[in-house]
Amino acid sequence: MKKKNVMACAIAMAAVVGGFTSCGLDIPKEIPSSYKTMTVTKSDIEIPIKFSAKMKGKTDVTVTPQISGQLVKICVSEGQQVVKGQTLFIIDQRNAQLELEAAQANLNAALAQESSAKLEYESNKNLFDKQIVSRYMLDNSLNTYHQAQAAVAQARASVNRAKVNLGFCTISAPVSGVIGMIPVRAGDQVSPMSELTILSGNTTMTAEFSVTEAVIEEMVQEGIKDFDKEKYIANLPDVTFIMKNGTEYPYKGRITSLTGVVDAATGSLASKATFPNPEGHLYSGIQGTIVIPVAEKNVMVVPQNAVVRLQDQSLVYKVQKDSTATAVTVTTAPTGNGKDVIILTGLKVGDKIVTEGANNVQEGERVLFPEEKKSEK
């Protein structure tokens, strides 16, 4: 009885399938999907090399007084934009003014003494010509006159020095720029050892950074000792400055200095790049990143997700003629864009590799399947 029921069910199922077929309905088939692949080619790519940098005004000047005295007036404020020659600080001028007046009085006295010595010399000369006085008296009066002339020159130098010292009481901006921190206050006693402020000439800014020796040798393939540094610097590409918050400064800069001497302690070269600062958005002391684009010609570039990291090895699954995948060990170099890598060894142009889903591929697994052709009605 049970066997009859089983047979009846089988016949019923066959009848249902036969009914679907007779009605023109196709039963869905499970078709395995292919992995995404690419064919390896060579191309040119630009690799961004990054270095930590610190901005500095190209003409940063430490403002200090030339004379000692009491600071009576501060004419600017921190962060103020000033122009060359603008008054910044004023030191008490009274002592300098008195010194000038004393020097001027000494000059007047010296001039009077010179005039008297000249008259005496000219008088003795006339008398000598008439053989009334001796040669000794004439020479003595001439020497007195020369001494008077020297005294006048010395007194005039004292006057000029006093004028300079009086001018030092007014401290002006040596360059145009932005006033930094002012650590002194009106009434403070200052001297040539006192730092009044730092004036940052910010129309052009300099980014200071260190380039590793390895990068320089890579950028200059013929060797760091064999190239003409000035010519090399002139041929370098424009560089970019990235702020701490990730914002890219809108103006490009130029590398202007490579020391040419490797620091034994750090193994790096001190370098500088200059940036225009027309809107004054860059300030002395801010930090960021210098980005130098380095062109790599005729290299094999593949997506980063095509490379499978296995311990200390990098693998790429190469598609064989029978559509199966074989793991190939490769060496890579970064591109800096976070998406691609450069293949150095392990592949050649024309090889087909798995890209998306490479982490799920097994050795010898079939990764490509032909698409089912649709029947024409």
Image: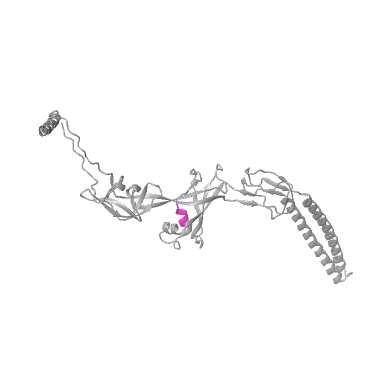
Residue 208 in picture, x, y percent from top left: 53, 53
> How is this picture coloured?
one colour
The stretch of residues the image draws in magenta is: 231-236
322 is within the stretch colored magenta: no
Residue at figure coordinates x 19%, y 37% from the top left: 29
Residue 35 in picture, x, y percent from top left: 27, 44
- For this view, does 211 lie left or right of residue 364? right
**Camera-side residue of 26 and 193:** 26
- For this view, does 124 lie left or right of residue 86? right
Image quarter hosting the C terminus = top left
Residue 157 visible to the viewer: yes
**Camera-side residue of 297 and 126:** 297
Above or below for 309 versus 118: above
| Residue farthest toward the right in the current orientation of the protein | 132
| Residue farthest toward the front in the current orientation of the protein | 1
Q: How many marks on residues?
A: 0
232 is within the stretch colored magenta: yes
**Camera-side residue of 127 and 322:** 322
Residue at figure coordinates x 42%, y 56% from the top left: 219
Residue 179 in picture, x, y percent from top left: 63, 46
Predominant secondary structure, magenta span: helix
